[in-house]
Amino acid sequence: MAARKNQTPLNEAGIEMSWRREPVSLLGIDDRARVWDQGHILTLQRRDVLFAANDRADTLYYVRSGRLKLEMGGPGGDDTIIVGMRSACGLAGYRSIIAGERHSATATALEPTSLIGIPRKLALDIFDRNQKMANYVVRLMARQVKASNHRLWAMTHKQLRGRLADTLLLLRDTFGYAAATRDIDIELTREELAQMSNMNTANAIRTLSSFTAEGFVKPNGRKITIIDEETLRKTSETG
């Protein structure tokens, strides 16, 4: 069972809660009050585990700030694959709660992250009674299935260059650029880039070095600068 760190009842946390953005904006007044009374706030530092594969899915998590990675396989290393990311205003753990299953992936903080935990029973009751929220989660799951199918095809049919190009474009589409730069707005280790691209770390480093030598991307610490997006897209398409 993953450790719960810095967990505080939401109504005792002394925080300001914004209800303006989806999905929390879809909650009615009564449901907001129930979340406030029954929920808790949880803070994680980078590499803290929110939940581990095979943990009981007893809580729905709403990401207030920060980012999580969802990974399957061993605890890090080249046998691990990153299967998803969650960022601010995202939900984590919803599939397992709806399916009534244990978690199939491990959720780990990529940076300092603040979350609101909603008990499973309350989350399911909200989904049952709130059609807008239920529709939101259905659309979320449909997009997740589509993205997973695309990545599965890419990982099994594309060469290393195409896989890494796909990963960089996915990160750009998910997190955008850092303010006033062409840096993808997420910090990842080379190992994490490899885990997202279904390759070992050495191959990820060599492939990224090849992209850099060709001049269409540039490493910037744990961030990646996209210099020529069109060439990156062509590399993805021909990979």
Image: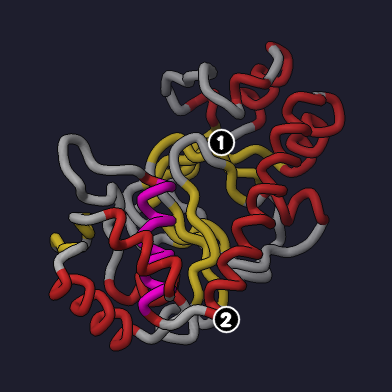
**Looking at the rendering, which quadrant does residue 188 occupy?**
bottom left
Query: Mark 2, residues whose alpha carbon is within 10 Å: few (<14), some, or many (≥20)?
Result: few
> Magenta residues?
161-174
Earlier sequence position, callout 1 versus callout 2: 1
The residue pinned by badge 2 equals 156
Q: Is residue 219 left or right of residue 188?
A: left
Work out whether residue 44 or residue 175 is closer to the camera in this orientation and state it.
175
Mark 1 falls on what kind of element? Answer: strand
Q: Is residue 43 left or right of residue 103?
A: left
Work out whether residue 122 or residue 108 is closer to the camera in this orientation and state it.
108
The residue pinned by badge 1 equals 40
Query: Horizontal and vertical percent for residue 40?
Result: 56, 36
> Which mark is in front, 1 or 2?
2
**Looking at the rendering, which quadrant does residue 161 occupy?**
bottom left
Seen at 51% across and 54% down, the residue is: 4
Mark number displayed over residue 83: none
Q: How many marks?
A: 2
Seen at 16% across and 63% down, the residue is: 218
